[in-house]
Amino acid sequence: MKTNMTIRSLLFIFTASMLAACSAFQPEEQSLPALRVEYSPWWGDYTIVIAKANGLFEKYGVEVEAVYYDVYSDSFADMAAGQLDGGLYGLGEAMKVSATTELKLVGIYDNGGFNTIIAKPDITSLADLRGKRIGVLLGTVYELFVVQALASAGIQRSDVQLVNVAPEDTISQFPNNLDAAYSWEPVTSDAVAQGFKVLFTSDKIEEFAIPDGIFFRASVVQQRPEDIRAFIKAWYEAVDFRLTNPETSRQIIADYIGVSVDEVFPDHQLKIMTFTDNQGYFEIKEAGKPSIIMNTASTIADFFLRTGILSNSPDLNSFLDASYLK
């Protein structure tokens, strides 16, 4: 009996040891890499800074790396190459990127800002632009903005000469090369200070806004849906913090990007979108009519197709994904 007990004991010890050894060599659960998300020096983009600084991504269980680009269009190639998971893009720019690398809009974070048409002092109305040279970055939603503004005054695109000029370069092109131009802040304020006139502002096209959105590559959304949901929760909690603590937020932004708080200029004309605002954009308010964001995206897509900027019509039902706002 003793001998039998000893053998059984040895077998027990051997088995337990083998199980422990196997357990020790079990591969550890692989943690997912951080979501790499582009941001640039834009008042709306700084919500990602607040979320990072306040630990909100960690609160909801997702790791995020905020990747800074001084010129946000420089990120498009990196997105196409899979070096970024997400980006904070204008709707039109994202649509063009999505033609190469499928993107999904999972939230709107601002209304795109205050867009204007500025002109030389002797031009006092849109009607005066017939036959004139208008600077705008061609092949973008800014061109669409100009075309719609002109149409509101009964002017066709063929009635003017559109000159390919970036908004940052417009003032230097007056008066030798331009009579008017598309512009945004702070260029518009600089132009007014130099005596130029504001002929048209984006708030006069109530049915058409060009919002900025939170975009992720479609493959990332498919593979990591819970991380996308966590990102959205953290983002809109950061928005609420920004709106209720504006001065504290400015200081947080300044500290994060390494500048003085006086160098962080609030854009009071830019509407930062809340979670509730998003629901309003995606909501179908009248049977048979599209939501605000679908109507805007359709307008942009039609313009891009008509002008040859896009060769194929995008699947907007896939491009616009409201499921993470529910």
Image (spheres, helix red, strand yellow):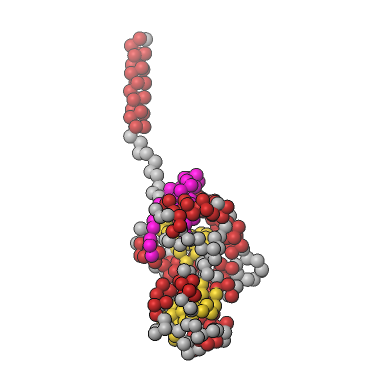
x, y percentage for residue 138?
42, 78
Q: Is residue 178 left or right of residue 209?
A: left
Task: Name the one closer to the observer, 41 or 293.
Answer: 41
Residue 52 falls inside the magenta stretch: yes
Residue found 44% across the figure and 69% down from its top:
93
| Residue 242 horizontal/vertical position (percent) | 53, 54
Q: Is residue 203 visible?
A: yes
Which is nearer the eye, 59 or 304?
59
**Does 204 appear above or below 325?**
below
The reply, left or right, for residue 22 in relation to residue 214 is left
Quadrant in which the C terminus appears: bottom right
Q: Residue at x 49, y 83 (%)?
A: 121
Pick the residue in front: 28 or 187: 187
Quadrant housing the N terminus: top left
What residue range appears in magenta? 45-71
287 vs 301, left or right, is: right
Q: What residue do we see at 63% from left, 71% from top?
A: 289
Residue 82 position within the rendered picture, expressed as x and y whole percent measured from the top left: 36, 59
Q: State the residue at coordinates (51%, 75%).
A: 116
The picture places residue 239, in percent across and down from the top left corner, at: 54, 54
**Considering only vertical position in the picture, is 199 above or below 97?**
below
Q: Is residue 231 visible?
A: no
Name above or below for residue 61 compared with residue 42: above
Residue pushed farthest top? 2
Q: In which quarter of the image is residue 261?
A: bottom left
Magenta segment includes 280 = no
Residue furthest to the right = 286
Please tell me whether residue 105 is drawn above or below residue 164 in the rendered image: above
- In which quadrant of the rendered view does residue 174 lie? bottom left
